[in-house]
Image (spheres, grey):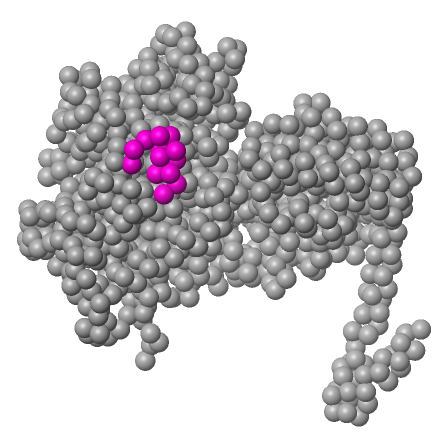
Amino acid sequence: MQKLVDKVVSGDLRSASRLIRMIDDGHPQSHEALKQLFPHCGGARVIGITGPPGAGKSTLSSSLIDIIRQRNKSVGVLAVDPSSPITGGAILGDRIRMSRHALDEDVFIRSLASRGHFGGITPATRGAIRVMDAMGKDYVIVETVGVGQDEVDIARLADTTLIVWVPGLGDNVQAMKAGIMEVGDVFVVNKAEHPDTANTVNYLKSVFRQTGSSGPIQRDWIPPVLETVALNSRGIDELFKVIDEHAQYTSRASEYYLARKRADCEVELRGFISREINHRISRQLADGEKINAQVGQIITGETDIYVVTDSLLQELE
Amino acid sequence: MKNIRVLIGILGMDQHEVAAVGIAKMLRDHGMEVIYAGCFNTPETLFQSAIEEDVDVIGISSHSWEYLYYLPELMELLAAEEEPVPVVVGGSVVTAKDAQELTAIGVAAVYGSGASDGEIIDSIKELADR
Amino acid sequence: MPSTVRTKSGIPLKNIYTPEDDPDRDYQRDLGNPGSYPFTRGTRDNPGGGWIQRELSGEGDPLRSNAQFKYLLEMGQTGIDVIGDSPTMSLMDPDHPLAKYVVGTQGVSVCCHNDYRDLLRDIPLDEISISSSAPGMFTVASLYLLAKEGGISPAALRGSVLQWPFYSENCGYAYKMPFDLHLRMSCDVIEFCSREMPRFHGYLEDTYFFSEAGLNAVEEAALGFIEIRHIVRTLLNRGLAIDSFAPRIAILVNCTMDFYEEIAKIRAMRRIFSRMMKEEFGAQDPRSMAVNIACHTSGLSLTSEQPANNIVRGAVQTVALGLAGIQALEISTFDEGFRTPSEEAHRVGLRTQQIVDLETNITKVQDPFGGSWFMESLTDEVEGKILALVEEIESRGDPAELVTSGYFRQFFEGTMSRHHQQMSAGEITKVGLNVHKIPEEEDTLLRDVSEVKIEPYRQRADDIAAFKLSRDQAGVNESLLRVHNTVQSPGKNIMEGVINAVQIGATMGEVIGVMRQASGEPYDPYGHLRSPIEDLL
């Protein structure tokens, strides 16, 4: 394990790729590996990109990669797409839109399936970010599909979160009111060749004028609203400038930003603990003729589910 | 939970996607994670994608003879790896003789147009388990 | 007993049809004689019967393909149908690194005016109709120049080029350019042809290629009409009169083995087209309402197993098309599963057409199904379903936006997957593939011909590279810059600049590259080449 970790830290692609797989598969040793990697993390700047399907997130990522590479920086990309809730399978096709970077050794693109986790951000996503970070990537771009809770997750986790929108999607602007307005750091109206662009941009700007400082914590960064045409890289320089400005802002340790980091850490910690507890419980129970036997008795009416719950919990304690 | 990860791609200028898309969805419906690389791949891009994605199997769909030239190049790249990812090939243009030649250069399985879903799934599962 | 038998698009077929199945027929309103509105029974009164008989050709370099045309014409072919190899179809020159193993193996490699000169050497352009699937803008430019060079009026040229701005990217050959630019190219070609080459179809709506993504007859026709309608609206918005270009719209359809439904589809499409042009777009010239329909029989309907069986499939499809009435036909040849047609397969394809034409009298009676209780009710049903699907898709929003938002990509992925599932489940019966199979070692008939491979024409890359070095580069660059600037001037027709550029020796890859650049795209979307005018911009 130490050897694998050492190789990841030295930037070895194959080892990093293998470790991400172990994390994704819930390999028992992945926790230990991450523990050892952790001291090597913190160097990467994490950019979250989220928005509805078809908004052009991968194309936008691809354009951001261009700029990062022009600056001679390295980048990892995590493209997260939903797994089928029924079969657990997934089709992950985001690489196609980033194909021009396929042979660039300083660009590491990894597709991840959400594997049953609601929302794009899974514990594996966090692990994968840390692997890329520990490898020495200067930037990690995390791309998730999302409308709703997912954006909130990614926004807590990323240093800078881009919410990507397209004009003319009708009711989507309404959907934006629900939560995500508060968490996006930069709003990108992509496909800005569309005639409705100005309306969408003006709408967003007016919302921020009204609600810019709302939310549970006083917000001292009013999210800029930018127009891009990612397909031909229009507006991307401007966007990256804003991402840089946001980096400056977060480095000043604003109260808002720190609170967000605290919240993210808490979510992750609680997640870890409850997962571990669940594992332990199921290990104790699922060896579980005990459960089977009790279920049998509940069904036949010899006992009831409440009594059984109490007695099993007592045993676990 | 270990999910099988398969890279599906088409090489060169071949742009017939019917089979590739059909297979990708079929594999997804059988619980696999398919990294769909679409068209315009070269041996180098598929090789690099396979490593970055840590896939268990690479599947190539062919509707043009380009694979005859590209596959030896891909197999050579993979052979230099410690644990080469197995490669499978499918397509109606692949004749029995081609299949023999592919097997000779190390292709793990070749599916003709008559291959059933069951055959393909079983063989991919078996290759992924190795 | 099997459950209800249905056509591929899901229309139930009954064992027997009676007058009750077709109660309210109004002959003039719904059918009309062949050649009369609403053209259900045929585009024109065609007493001789028959169609332009041709086989899809194009292989290797232009001279090799020229030899193909000549042997096909000697065998009795009455028109030329040519397709480019996959680099050509994707607007790529043969010296592009990605093209190296596929030059000339699946069609002809053509990328400059010299190539067209070789391709059409000794072909009487004022006598033979030339249908080209190679990129329309460049085919038209070269045909126009060749006519002038040969002292023929471009107005005498006949044939067609396909336009596929909606679907090429998703299931044809990728142009790797913004949709708006592709649409503009198409419209510029159509506008140019309507003016300069009035007998030539500058707009062949090719529903064949995308229907091979597993679409049924209704989906094929509906998506075709969606594209036609959008292109027509775009041309009308340019200020063109409907009657100035509508007569030059033709449709190339698919024909699967679903015999009756394919006939009904063609009849329904003629009726839909004529009513659409007249009632919705205000056409007054009857030629605007009568659409020529050509057909390419389905490659997807054929099998690699027992390839001789494909000859029978081609014959059955030809009979269906003879009964439906069409203007031109190519049969997918028996070796389709393996390769572009061999000379032997070409001959069989052509002979199939000739047998149906000359031995059967099938073509001597126009629309023999007209008035059939069954066929008229099926035609109505197919028509209704096509119109409903057009309406359903158009209600989702501007069709152009559906293209860019990926709606059609999803549509095709759905049909591809459905086709796969139907095949896997044995819902589509294919003799030799999923029933009546024989052991591989016994499957030898016509295999030897079918399995012969064509070596890529590697020499072409060197030849074209050498050609590029031999040109007046300053002149070429100047012409490319002009194309570039025209693209950046909205409202200007690109054709004139393209004709000028190809005349001076610019290649297709170069012209397209600078057009991409002009719209903010990389010159080479595959990242290998540098624009010749990079330093001039």
Q: Is residue C121 above or below residue C8?
A: above
Whether residue C6 is visible to the viewer of this picture, yes or no, is yes
Whether residue C325 is visible to the viewer of this picture, yes or no, is no
Give the percent coordinates (x, y) of residue B110.
45, 52
Give the percent coordinates (x, y) of residue C402.
49, 44
Q: Which residues are magenta?
A: C229-242
Q: Which quadrant of the figure has residue C205?
A: top left
Residue at 50% across, 10% down: C536
Q: Is residue C34 left or right of residue B20?
A: left
Residue at 84% across, 83% down: A306
Q: Which quadrant of the figure has residue C482?
A: top left
Q: Nearer the viewer, residue C295 or A91?
A: C295
**Quadrant of the frame with the N terminus of chain C:** bottom left
Residue at 74% across, 51% down: A178
Secondary structure mostly seen in the magenta stretch: helix
Q: Is residue A289 above or below residue A69?
A: below
Q: Is residue C506 left or right of residue C199?
A: right
Q: Is residue C480 left or right of residue C376?
A: right
Q: Nearer the viewer, residue C188 or C246?
A: C246
Q: Nearer the viewer, residue C340 or C142?
A: C142
Give the percent coordinates (x, y) of residue C506.
37, 16
Q: Is residue C36 left or right of residue A278?
A: left
Q: Is residue B72 above or below residue C238?
A: below
Q: Nearer the viewer, residue C126 or A310?
A: C126
Is residue C238 inside the magenta stretch? yes
Residue at 68% across, 36% down: A202
Is residue A213 inside the magenta stretch? no
Give the percent coordinates (x, y) of residue C370.
15, 60
